[in-house]
């Protein structure tokens, strides 16, 4: 029988010395028992032949049957692993000669009885995946562990992303899509949504607050701007008075605009933005102007540089959020994971859904891959060297097989005693 090259079974497991010692001890016991019944047979038979008591015949018969039973079971056990006494008797050394068939049989047995979709589904469904996962996950330390592991994986992916690859993707995939799609209608729709949601009010408020802040902290700069625009023929005191009055009026106007949501400036801005949103969606000439501006903008080399800078900044921000245990993202992730774990434990409907999904997923995976999984058994056994395979199997099961020899000796002796007794009674 040919075997794949380099396919020897791995040697030297940690428990091998103990297994070898236990096997040796049981062999000595079984062999010692065989020797004992042989000696008993010889003594009892000799005594009986030379006029010994009647009971010596019973002992001799029992011992004789015990010897037969012991030798028969020794032959059967030995034939599993090697040729008894080195003789090439047919149907012996079964494991070395039939290991491939045994491996395939074990493969089929496992595939049929252990990797059946229904068996796996029932087993997974009975585990209570949702309860186990939920109980574990709702512990803050465990939620943090999951968040940290996910963050580590994600940070590795982000940090390892090639900048040139990102730029190439943007140049070849993103930019062409931006060029092909008209901007005017999209910009008009976005602007209309902003107006409908009043999101621009926040921007207006922010701009007004910043302008007011600048005026409050830069009155001299404001006055200088006014004075620089004053005519040369006006007196200095008049220019300064006008500048001071303009400063006060500017602060007053800003305060009024901020305080009154219906201020004329605000309503004028709303009408202007609404008109622009409508024009962007309906005015073909304005749409053409937007397209021309888009083409000029995308053709500029600064676009690629801007994309690279945006990506670098985004990556840095993401890495900071992910790797910082106290960042908002990490804290939120821990909180949500723990909350989800609590829901898995406390919500029966969610738990049933998760358990069913886990069972279905396991069943589908087994149905699809059980051939590949079970084939590992047959392929692995086929790759083992025959003699070493027999030695290792005997090392693990041989101790229990020696009990067969012991039982054969005892049972054979009892059967022999019964047969001899019945013979004496009936004949």
Image: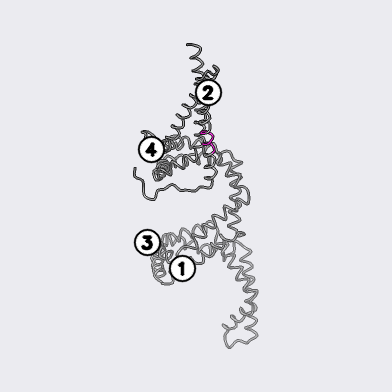
Say above or below: 244 vs 137. Answer: below
Return the residue at label 4. 98
Main SS, magenta residues: helix
Sequence-first tag of 4 and 2? 2
Q: Counting residues from the N terminus, which is met first, the one under dot 3 or under dot 2?
A: 2
- Residue denoted by label 2: 44
Write down the residue under mark 1. 308
Q: Which mark is residue 180?
A: 3
Q: Position of residue 202 (x, y in %)?
A: 58, 62
Badge 3 local density, few (<14 within 10 Å), some, or many (20+)? few
Closer to the camera in the image, 144 or 207: 144
Closest to the camera, between mark 4 and mark 2, is 2
Looking at marks 1 and 3 on the same chain, the residue that comes earlier in the sequence is marked by: 3
Q: CA distance from mark 2 to mark 1?
A: 101 Å
Asked if the magenta segment contains residue 40, the reply would be no
- Residues in magenta, as a range: 25-31
**Are there few (<14), some (14-19), or many (20+) residues within 10 Å of tag 2?**
many
Q: Residue furthest front?
A: 50
């Amino acid at each position: 029988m040919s075997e794949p090259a380099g396919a020897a079974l791995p040697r030297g497991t940690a428990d091998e010395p103990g297994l070898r010692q236990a096997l040796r001890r049981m062999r000595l016991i079984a062999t010692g028992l065989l020797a004992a019944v042989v000696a008993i047979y010889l003594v009892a038979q000799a005594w009986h032949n030379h006029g010994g008591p009647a009971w010596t015949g019973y002992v001799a018969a029992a011992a004789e049957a015990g010897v037969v039973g012991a030798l028969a079971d020794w032959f059967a056990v030995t034939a599993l692993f090697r040729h008894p006494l080195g003789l090439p008797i047919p149907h012996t050394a079964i494991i070395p000669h039939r290991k491939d068939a045994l491996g395939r049989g074990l493969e089929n047995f496992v595939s049929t009885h252990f990797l059946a979709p229904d068996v796996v589904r029932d087993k997974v469904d009975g585990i209570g995946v949702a309860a186990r996962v939920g109980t574990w996950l709702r512990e803050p330390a465990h939620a943090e562990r999951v968040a940290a592991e996910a963050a580590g994986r994600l940070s590795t992916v982000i940090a390892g992303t090639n900048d040139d690859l990102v730029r190439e993707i943007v140049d070849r995939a993103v930019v062409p899509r931006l060029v092909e799609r008209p901007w005017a209608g999209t910009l008009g729709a976005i602007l209309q949504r902003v107006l409908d949601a009043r999101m621009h009010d926040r921007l207006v408020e922010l701009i007004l607050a910043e302008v007011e802040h600048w005026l409050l902290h830069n009155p001299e700069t404001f006055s200088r701007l006014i004075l620089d625009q004053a005519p040369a023929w006006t007196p200095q005191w008049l220019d300064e008075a006008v500048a001071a009055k303009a400063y006060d009026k500017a602060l007053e106007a800003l305060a009024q605009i901020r305080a009154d949501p219906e201020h004329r400036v605000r309503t004028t801005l709303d009408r202007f933005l609404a008109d622009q949103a409508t024009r962007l969606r309906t005015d073909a000439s304005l749409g053409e102007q937007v397209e021309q501006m888009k083409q000029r903008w995308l053709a500029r080399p600064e676009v690629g540089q801007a994309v690279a800078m945006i990506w670098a900044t985004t990556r840095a921000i993401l890495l900071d959020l992910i790797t910082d245990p106290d960042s908002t993202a990490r804290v939120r992730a821990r909180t949500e994971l723990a909350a989800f774990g609590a829901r898995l434990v406390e919500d029966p409907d969610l738990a049933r859904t998760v358990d069913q999904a886990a069972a279905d997923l396991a069943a589908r995976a087994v149905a699809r891959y059980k051939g590949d999984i079970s084939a590992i058994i047959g392929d692995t056994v086929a790759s083992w060297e025959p003699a070493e395979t027999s030695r290792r199997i005997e090392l693990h099961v041989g101790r229990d097989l020696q009990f067969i020899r012991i039982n054969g000796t005892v049972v054979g002796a009892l059967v022999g005693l019964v047969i001899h007794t019945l013979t004496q009674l009936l004949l």
